[in-house]
Image (cartoon, rainbow, N blue to C red):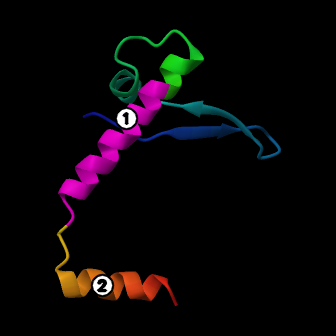
Amino acid sequence: MVSNTIEYTRDSEGKLRAVVIPIDLWVKIFPDAASSVEDVAEGLEDYCLGKAMDEAAETPLLGIEEAVAFLEQGSD
């Protein structure tokens, strides 16, 4: 079973100390073993964009009337 759960570790005072990322998730984000800060940033951006696109593909489309009503709600 693949776990994509990111864990956070804390010190005795409750302050965040580290982030634990499962290897399977790390490889998805950085398939080519990123070697620079720019590579890490680009890998993370690509992963997040891919996740957003996957979620969008599963979201039902709104009709014109529903879309207009949604947009009007935001301008209140």
| Secondary structure under the numbered disc 1 in the rendered image | helix
Q: How many marks?
A: 2
Which of pointers 2 and 1 lies earlier in the amino acid sequence?
1
Examine the image and state in which quarter residue 72 appears: bottom left
Per the picture, the main secondary structure of the magenta-coloured stretch is helix
Between label 2 and label 1, give the one nearer the viewer.
2
Left or right of residue 56, residue 40 in this image: right
Label 1 neighbour load within 10 Å: few <14, some 14-19, many 20+: some
Examine the image and state in which quarter residue 15 appears: top right
**Which residues are the magenta region?**
42-59
Residue that mark 1 sits on: 47
Residue that mark 2 sits on: 68
Does 19 sit above or below residue 62? above
**Label 2 vs label 1: CA separation?**
31 Å
Residue in front for this viewpoint, 24 or 38: 38
**Magenta-colored stretch includes residue 57:** yes
Residue 40 x, y percent position in the rendering: 51, 22
Residue 11 x, y percent position in the rendering: 76, 37
Residue 2 x, y percent position in the rendering: 28, 33
Identity of the residue drawn at 45% across and 31% down: 44
Left or right of residue 34, residue 56 in this image: left
